[in-house]
Image: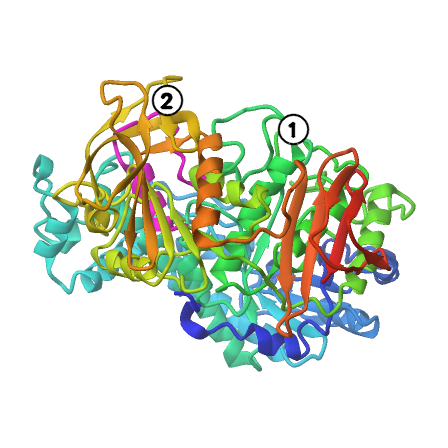
Amino acid sequence: MGDPGGRLHYHVCVEERYMQHRILHGAEYNPDQWLEEPEVLEQDIALMREARIDTVTLGTFSWSLLEPEEGVYSFEWMDEVMERLERAGIRVILATPSGARPRWLARKYPEVLRVGPDRRRRLFGERHNHCFTSPVFRERVYELDRRLAERYGRREHVILWHISNEFSGECHCELCQEAFRRWLYDRYDGDLEALNRAWWTAFWSHRYTSWEEIASPSPLGEPNLHGLNLDWRRFVTHQTVDFMLVEVRALRDGGPSLPVTTNLMGFQRDLDYFRLARHLDVVSWDSYPLWHGRGRTTPRVACGELDHNWDPEGRDWVLASGVAWAHALHRGLGGGRPFLLMESTPSHTNWQPWSKPKRPGMHVLSSLHAVAHGADSVQYFQWRAGRGGSEKFHGAVVYHDRRTDGRVFQEVRELGGILERLGGMEGSRVEAEVAVVFDWENRWALEDAQGPRNDGRLDYVEECWRWFDAWHRRGVGCDVVHPEGDWSAYRVVVAPLWYLVKEEWADRVARFVEQGGVFVTTVWSGVVEEHDLCHVGGFPGPLRGLVGVRSREVDVLVEDEVRRVAGVWGVCEGRLLCDVLAVEDEGVEVRAVYADGFYAGSPAATRVRRGRGWAYYVGTLLAQEGIDWLVGELMGEAGVVPALRVVPEGVDVSVRVTEEGRRYLWLLNFREHEVVVELPEGVWRDVLGGGERRGVLVLPGYGYAVLES
Ligand SMILES: [Zn+2]
């Protein structure tokens, strides 16, 4: 999956009309809300030019206007908008409108409405409330998409298809149940006994005797059959992708093959984006960090379900690291290529606990942050705030006061000018010599497990981010990679809480290490195989031979209980889980021991040389300071060189390298006061500030610099 399906033809797109040698600056444009006020639409174009917006996303929620009744299509309004945009030289990312369907469709064909795990059919309402399996829904979407492609796919200023909107959720209707059973039948080669073994259905006497007995997980019935749960999540991804491919086919059938994307949502839980992204030409995502937010309203704050939306202590540079981690994910989904920032807010959202505006300077800084970490665009939701509806208080380039002399409009305009000057950087890659493994299947299985702790504190996304953050704070570029991705470019790969490990993956990891790679895994890894059945012979299962240690048992620390861990680097805390380890290989070196507990003095972290590389095993979840120390050791062992010798707290560092080898160092200060940065040796060209820099650089509060070596 390193090159997901080989379908990405991003570089071809960059060369052609897609990017036109600049970083896109755009917004989601909803003229369908203003058709009765033509003067508003006329003003829009002039205002877009004033704001230096060069691209808009059009038509995301326009179904009820494009097809007001079944089979009756109305494109005239869109023709007019298209022509206006074309005349102004504004490019269009054209959306398919399947994210929200018209009322007539639900009234006429109730099968298009989603059924919940409680087996109740939803009423019409909201968006993303449709069955992905319904033949009627698929047919109506196909017919509309094909017509859009026929009508607009050849227009010079239409550059990209934006399929649907934020795919998510699941449907438990009878059509979906039937599709699930067919998918399982194929997966298990028609062998029901193989399914019974894989799901361990002898437990509680839950054997299936016919395929018809299989139903999706439900709180009313079967919520804790882990093999079923895992296969259901895989099926939901499969079915969503299958639906998306109907849309891709419609677009291909209707016109020339423009590249396709769909807007993803970071570390959402529902879908395995590594599988979905294989079918995209370019990855794009919607990023909504709440800058300057603080306070803890849920245990999953910095990362996880809320997608690193704010830092509990209000440290914007910590939040920036979480956002960089999400950007790295989207690079990883595209095999390391740049992605598009499809949505962000120019000021505030309306759906977070607080709709806090960005302080002066933060808009430019946070947008450049996305570009520093691999984005080839900065786009907003939304161009103009609608007067009604659920998101009427969501930030917009043109807000309800309709003024252009306000702070938000002016900062958008300022950013547009900066992005123009960054032309030529599109297509460049983010430099990274280390990676953290991330796998949705692992996450699903780990979160579904009952035990060893059920208090929700074993947070896979956050644990992975803590390792990313340790590299990031040292100025080392870090990627996110799938277990089956291409690891060959990395010196170090870290796989924290790698609970689900397929037998065949052990050989890949062993080869990576033999050839000189450094591999690190932690407690609660190698526990189950792909069906969520436990590995036998001791954890970490198939990785045991590589790391040379075995977990005898796992101690679980309750509440604020911690274990002291004494390492060659110092003493720190172990958290949440502690392996009691047996050393099984003479070559194993103990790097840290437990300093207390009934297993005091026994190994807490080990390493062993294999071929030209090292395999590390960390038997607990180290406090951040322990991870930092270990990362320091790994940098030395693997010869990883940071972009800056010393990274001042608050400064975010990234490096982008063009195909021709031009190297750009990005320095972004997320503190409100100035910071002094000691530059690496040599003379640096200041791309935005002009002139040359050497020695030290003073970054003002929320200041930034892009330096070319
Ligand atoms: Zn359904």
Q: Where is residue 152 in the image (x, y as percent from the top left)?
A: 65, 76
Magenta span has 446? Answer: yes
Residue 3 at x, y = what percent?
Answer: 44, 69
Question: Does the numbered disc 1 mark a residue whose Cβ is under 8 Å from ligand 1?
Answer: no
Q: What quarter of the picture does the N terminus occupy?
A: bottom left
The image shows residue 515 at horizontal and vertical percentages of 34, 63
Q: 516 or 153, which is in the foreground?
A: 516
What segment is highlighted magenta in the picture? Answer: 437-461
6 relative to 289, above or below:
below
Q: Which residue is drawn at 87% across and 48% down?
A: 410
Three-letter code, disc 2:
Arg
The residue lying toward the viewer, choosing from 230 and 71, is 230
Q: Name the residue under label 1.
A: 314
Q: Is mark 2 on a helix, strand or loop?
A: strand
The stretch drawn in magenta includes residue 509:
no
Task: State the separation of the CA atoms marked 2 and 1.
Answer: 29 Å
Count all numbered tags in the image, as a single digit.
2
Q: Is residue 343 above or below residue 607?
A: below
Image location (x, y in percent) of residue 277: 46, 62
Question: On the rendered image, what quadrant is the C terminus found in?
Answer: bottom right
| Residue under the point 57% across and 72% down | 10
